[in-house]
Image (cartoon, rainbow, N blue to C red):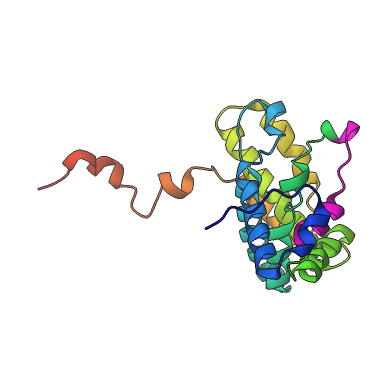
Amino acid sequence: MGVRGRHSSMADMKGRDRLTRIVDFFNECGMLRKTPRTGYQFLGTGSENVAEHSFRTAVIGHVLALMAGADVARTTYMCLFHDLHEARTSDFNYVNRIYNKSERTRALEHATGGTGLEEDVLGYWAELEETATLEARLAQDADQLDFILNLKEEFDLGNKYAGQWLESAVQRVRTEWGRELADAIENTDHKDWWFLGPDPDWWTRKNGKGKK
Protein backbone atom coordinates (compact mmCIF):
# COMPACT_ATOMS: atom_id res chain seq x y z
CA MET A 1 0.00 0.00 0.00
CA GLY A 2 1.45 3.33 -1.00
CA VAL A 3 1.78 6.30 1.30
CA ARG A 4 -0.13 9.35 0.10
CA GLY A 5 1.67 12.66 -0.03
CA ARG A 6 1.20 15.29 2.63
CA HIS A 7 -1.51 17.91 2.07
CA SER A 8 -0.50 21.49 2.67
CA SER A 9 -3.89 23.22 2.83
CA MET A 10 -7.61 22.62 3.18
CA ALA A 11 -7.95 23.15 -0.58
CA ASP A 12 -5.95 19.97 -1.12
CA MET A 13 -8.65 18.00 0.69
CA LYS A 14 -11.25 18.76 -2.01
CA GLY A 15 -9.79 16.18 -4.36
CA ARG A 16 -10.31 13.34 -1.90
CA ASP A 17 -13.31 11.04 -2.40
CA ARG A 18 -16.03 10.75 0.21
CA LEU A 19 -14.87 7.47 1.76
CA THR A 20 -11.35 8.81 2.15
CA ARG A 21 -12.71 11.95 3.79
CA ILE A 22 -14.79 9.81 6.17
CA VAL A 23 -11.59 7.97 7.16
CA ASP A 24 -9.95 11.38 7.65
CA PHE A 25 -12.88 12.28 9.88
CA PHE A 26 -12.49 9.11 11.96
CA ASN A 27 -8.79 9.82 12.39
CA GLU A 28 -9.62 13.35 13.46
CA CYS A 29 -12.10 12.06 16.05
CA GLY A 30 -9.28 9.90 17.39
CA MET A 31 -7.28 13.05 18.17
CA LEU A 32 -9.76 13.76 20.98
CA ARG A 33 -8.13 10.88 22.89
CA LYS A 34 -4.93 12.91 22.84
CA THR A 35 -6.51 16.29 23.60
CA PRO A 36 -6.48 17.06 27.34
CA ARG A 37 -9.17 19.00 29.15
CA THR A 38 -7.20 21.90 30.58
CA GLY A 39 -9.24 23.16 33.53
CA TYR A 40 -7.72 20.56 35.83
CA GLN A 41 -4.43 22.47 35.67
CA PHE A 42 -6.05 25.06 37.92
CA LEU A 43 -7.92 22.59 40.13
CA GLY A 44 -4.65 20.84 40.94
CA THR A 45 -5.98 17.28 40.74
CA GLY A 46 -7.79 15.15 38.19
CA SER A 47 -7.32 14.77 34.47
CA GLU A 48 -9.17 13.55 31.40
CA ASN A 49 -9.11 13.90 27.65
CA VAL A 50 -11.90 15.25 25.47
CA ALA A 51 -12.89 11.80 24.18
CA GLU A 52 -13.44 10.55 27.74
CA HIS A 53 -15.51 13.60 28.56
CA SER A 54 -17.58 13.30 25.36
CA PHE A 55 -18.44 9.65 25.99
CA ARG A 56 -19.94 10.13 29.43
CA THR A 57 -21.61 13.38 28.36
CA ALA A 58 -23.42 11.40 25.64
CA VAL A 59 -24.51 8.77 28.18
CA ILE A 60 -25.80 11.46 30.55
CA GLY A 61 -27.61 13.23 27.70
CA HIS A 62 -29.29 9.98 26.72
CA VAL A 63 -30.56 9.51 30.27
CA LEU A 64 -31.66 13.13 30.65
CA ALA A 65 -33.66 12.93 27.42
CA LEU A 66 -35.43 9.80 28.68
CA MET A 67 -36.23 11.54 31.97
CA ALA A 68 -37.59 14.61 30.17
CA GLY A 69 -39.48 12.77 27.43
CA ALA A 70 -37.33 14.53 24.84
CA ASP A 71 -35.85 13.30 21.56
CA VAL A 72 -33.25 10.84 22.86
CA ALA A 73 -31.30 10.41 19.64
CA ARG A 74 -30.95 14.13 18.91
CA THR A 75 -29.91 14.93 22.47
CA THR A 76 -27.34 12.14 22.49
CA TYR A 77 -25.89 13.16 19.11
CA MET A 78 -25.49 16.77 20.26
CA CYS A 79 -23.59 15.52 23.29
CA LEU A 80 -21.46 13.17 21.21
CA PHE A 81 -20.28 15.92 18.84
CA HIS A 82 -20.32 18.91 21.21
CA ASP A 83 -16.53 19.15 21.57
CA LEU A 84 -15.47 17.67 18.23
CA HIS A 85 -13.98 21.01 17.16
CA GLU A 86 -11.38 20.64 19.91
CA ALA A 87 -9.51 18.11 17.77
CA ARG A 88 -8.43 21.24 15.86
CA THR A 89 -8.76 24.07 18.39
CA SER A 90 -7.76 22.25 21.61
CA ASP A 91 -9.66 22.87 24.85
CA PHE A 92 -9.70 26.45 26.13
CA ASN A 93 -10.30 26.72 29.87
CA TYR A 94 -11.92 29.78 31.43
CA VAL A 95 -8.64 31.65 31.81
CA ASN A 96 -7.58 30.86 28.23
CA ARG A 97 -10.87 32.28 26.96
CA ILE A 98 -10.07 35.70 28.41
CA TYR A 99 -7.23 35.99 25.90
CA ASN A 100 -7.95 33.50 23.12
CA LYS A 101 -10.82 32.88 20.74
CA SER A 102 -11.28 29.78 18.61
CA GLU A 103 -13.28 29.52 15.38
CA ARG A 104 -15.26 26.49 16.43
CA THR A 105 -17.81 26.48 13.62
CA ARG A 106 -15.08 26.89 11.00
CA ALA A 107 -13.18 23.99 12.55
CA LEU A 108 -16.26 21.79 12.24
CA GLU A 109 -16.81 22.89 8.64
CA HIS A 110 -13.27 21.82 7.80
CA ALA A 111 -13.57 18.57 9.76
CA THR A 112 -16.74 17.49 7.99
CA GLY A 113 -16.09 18.92 4.53
CA GLY A 114 -16.45 16.29 1.82
CA THR A 115 -17.71 13.60 4.21
CA GLY A 116 -21.43 14.00 3.62
CA LEU A 117 -21.80 14.60 7.38
CA GLU A 118 -21.82 18.38 7.16
CA GLU A 119 -25.58 18.88 7.51
CA ASP A 120 -25.94 16.52 10.46
CA VAL A 121 -22.93 17.57 12.53
CA LEU A 122 -23.23 21.30 11.85
CA GLY A 123 -26.97 21.09 12.46
CA TYR A 124 -26.41 19.57 15.89
CA TRP A 125 -23.79 22.20 16.62
CA ALA A 126 -26.04 25.11 15.61
CA GLU A 127 -28.91 23.77 17.72
CA LEU A 128 -26.62 23.31 20.71
CA GLU A 129 -25.23 26.83 20.41
CA GLU A 130 -28.67 28.42 20.06
CA THR A 131 -29.98 26.46 23.07
CA ALA A 132 -33.56 27.15 22.00
CA THR A 133 -34.79 23.55 22.14
CA LEU A 134 -35.28 21.29 25.13
CA GLU A 135 -32.86 18.80 23.61
CA ALA A 136 -30.13 21.45 23.36
CA ARG A 137 -30.65 22.51 26.96
CA LEU A 138 -30.46 18.89 28.07
CA ALA A 139 -27.23 18.45 26.10
CA GLN A 140 -25.79 21.56 27.73
CA ASP A 141 -26.77 20.12 31.12
CA ALA A 142 -25.15 16.79 30.28
CA ASP A 143 -21.90 18.63 29.58
CA GLN A 144 -22.07 20.28 33.00
CA LEU A 145 -23.16 17.13 34.82
CA ASP A 146 -20.13 15.22 33.56
CA PHE A 147 -17.95 17.99 34.97
CA ILE A 148 -19.93 17.97 38.22
CA LEU A 149 -19.35 14.22 38.58
CA ASN A 150 -15.61 14.75 38.19
CA LEU A 151 -15.60 17.60 40.69
CA LYS A 152 -17.53 15.50 43.22
CA GLU A 153 -14.96 12.71 42.88
CA GLU A 154 -12.06 15.11 43.41
CA PHE A 155 -13.88 16.63 46.41
CA ASP A 156 -14.47 13.15 47.89
CA LEU A 157 -10.76 12.49 47.47
CA GLY A 158 -9.86 15.56 49.53
CA ASN A 159 -9.52 18.52 47.15
CA LYS A 160 -11.36 21.30 49.00
CA TYR A 161 -11.20 23.59 45.95
CA ALA A 162 -13.22 21.07 43.99
CA GLY A 163 -16.06 21.77 46.44
CA GLN A 164 -15.94 25.47 45.56
CA TRP A 165 -15.94 24.68 41.84
CA LEU A 166 -18.81 22.25 42.39
CA GLU A 167 -21.01 24.97 43.90
CA SER A 168 -20.45 27.16 40.83
CA ALA A 169 -20.94 24.36 38.31
CA VAL A 170 -24.28 23.36 39.81
CA GLN A 171 -25.56 26.91 39.25
CA ARG A 172 -25.03 26.50 35.50
CA VAL A 173 -27.48 23.59 35.18
CA ARG A 174 -30.51 24.71 33.16
CA THR A 175 -33.31 22.12 33.38
CA GLU A 176 -35.32 20.61 36.21
CA TRP A 177 -34.07 17.13 35.29
CA GLY A 178 -30.50 18.33 35.27
CA ARG A 179 -30.96 19.93 38.68
CA GLU A 180 -32.41 16.70 40.06
CA LEU A 181 -29.36 14.79 38.91
CA ALA A 182 -26.97 17.50 40.12
CA ASP A 183 -28.53 17.28 43.59
CA ALA A 184 -28.22 13.48 43.57
CA ILE A 185 -24.57 13.71 42.50
CA GLU A 186 -23.80 16.08 45.37
CA ASN A 187 -25.32 13.62 47.83
CA THR A 188 -23.76 10.42 46.48
CA ASP A 189 -20.25 9.19 47.29
CA HIS A 190 -18.46 8.57 44.01
CA LYS A 191 -17.25 5.13 45.14
CA ASP A 192 -20.59 3.74 46.34
CA TRP A 193 -21.33 1.96 43.05
CA TRP A 194 -18.41 -0.43 43.52
CA PHE A 195 -17.62 -0.25 47.24
CA LEU A 196 -21.09 -1.12 48.48
CA GLY A 197 -21.82 -3.39 45.55
CA PRO A 198 -24.52 -6.06 45.28
CA ASP A 199 -23.03 -8.08 48.17
CA PRO A 200 -21.22 -6.05 50.87
CA ASP A 201 -20.17 -9.31 52.61
CA TRP A 202 -17.59 -9.77 49.86
CA TRP A 203 -15.16 -7.64 51.85
CA THR A 204 -15.25 -9.99 54.85
CA ARG A 205 -15.09 -13.14 52.73
CA LYS A 206 -11.90 -12.04 50.98
CA ASN A 207 -9.02 -14.56 51.14
CA GLY A 208 -11.38 -17.41 52.00
CA LYS A 209 -12.57 -16.05 55.32
CA GLY A 210 -16.02 -17.36 56.17
CA LYS A 211 -15.70 -20.60 54.24
CA LYS A 212 -16.90 -23.69 56.05
Q: Residue at x 72, y 27 (%)?
A: 42
Residue ranking furthest to the left? 212
The residue lying toward the viewer, choosing from 69 and 47, is: 47
Task: Relative to 31, say whether 151 is above or below.
Answer: above
Q: In the rendering, at what x and y percent does residue 11 appear?
A: 83, 56
Q: Residue 152's x, y, as percent?
A: 62, 39
Residue located at (61% from left, 28% from top): 45
* Front residue of this view, candidates 62 and 192: 62
Q: Quadrant of residue 132?
A: bottom right
For the question of whether residue 109 can be seen, the reply is yes
Residue 114 at x, y percent in the picture: 77, 66
Would residue 24 be counted in the magenta stretch?
no
Instruction: Give the magenta-colored segment's residue range.
Output: 97-113
Is 110 magenta? The answer is yes
Residue 179 in sight from this viewpoint: no
Residue at the location (55% across, 31% down)? 157
Q: How many marks?
A: 0
